[in-house]
Image (cartoon, rainbow, N blue to C red):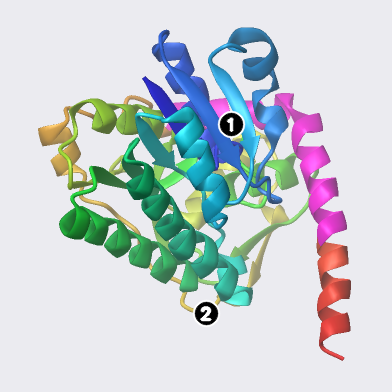
Amino acid sequence: MKLLVTGGAGFIGTNFIRYWLQHNSDDAIVNFDRLTYAGNLSNLTDIAETHYPKRYRFVHGDILDFALVESILKKECPDVIVNFAAESHNSRAILHPRRFFETNVMGTQVLLDASRSTACSGFITSLRTPYNASKAAADHLVNAYFHSFGMPITISNCANNYGPYQHPEKLIPLFATNAIQDLPLTLYRSSHNRREWLHVEDHCRAIAAVLEYGKIGETYNVGSGVEKSIEEISDFILDILDKPQHLKTYVPDRPGHDCRYLLDSSKIARDVGWKPAIAFEDGMRETIRWYVENWKWWQEIQQKVDSEMVQEDKWERFTER
């Protein structure tokens, strides 16, 4: 089987590509990614150059480019598209909502239209303020193509992921890397708001199970049942790294800050046979250790982001004149 993975240079895409190629020795993957600030092709250097050079290739491009997406589908004719391409940072969605709707909604429509025009592939989208609204709209769009055009689609909605290769702007790697450097851990005032946490490898296993056993046209929630507050997460990280509590600081809440995220994952357990395998405490220890051991990886990303933010700030101030 051949898969087209969009957003494969991002956090979940990287881990999914690694998981799939390791567990499916006859399959091939085409990774299609625009390489925004959150995409890091070096995540897969060993895959491309050493482990699976004949079964993996990368194509640079934007899912908003219909002609390019259609040409890739015609050339590669994948059996399935797994869509991870998304803008995914809630706080950035408040500042730049248009970007989120362009990628998360219009980009999804481009993929659906190109897939429909070439008739090469099924479609599975893995989804997760303006960010939430854009992903909900993409959900409805994918379902509409199933009901209106008979496209073979499945949808998975996952809990908050954590694990290796996650961009250091996200909560757990941000707190871990800041604590490693003895920098403040900044919490919103409503620090007891709760989130459900899922290790990215368990998420990859869930998507693989949906691809193999899921029913066309269905939506599957992928969660762990483990809820932790932001306060609990920060305390766990400080404890593991033996750092002082006074590193925690507090700021006012962001607009639209949700009190709780929790999914009902009984359907995927019942119909597909999936359940999480990695205990939260074990997964967190492994993740924190990964960031301790991969200092160079995340420092290079932070330096790049800092530089890009300076340039973006200069451009926005120029256009406001």
Q: Is residue 51 magenta?
A: no
Q: Secondary structure at mark 2?
A: loop
Q: Position of residue 216 (x, y in %)?
A: 17, 41
Residue 137 quadrant? bottom left
Q: Which span is picked out in magenta? A: 281-308
The residue located at (64%, 68%) in the rendering is 250
Q: For the N terminus, give its image quadrant.
A: top left
CB-based contact (under 8 Å), mark 2 and mark 1: no
Can residue 180 be seen here? The reply is: yes
Name the residue at the bottom extreme.
Answer: 321
Q: Position of residue 69 (x, y in %)?
A: 52, 46
The residue located at (37%, 61%) in the rendering is 138
Which three-letter amino acid code belongs to the residue tagged 2?
Pro
Considering only vertical position in the picture, is 159 above or below 135? above
Q: Which residue is mark 1?
A: 164
Q: Which residue is mark 2?
A: 255
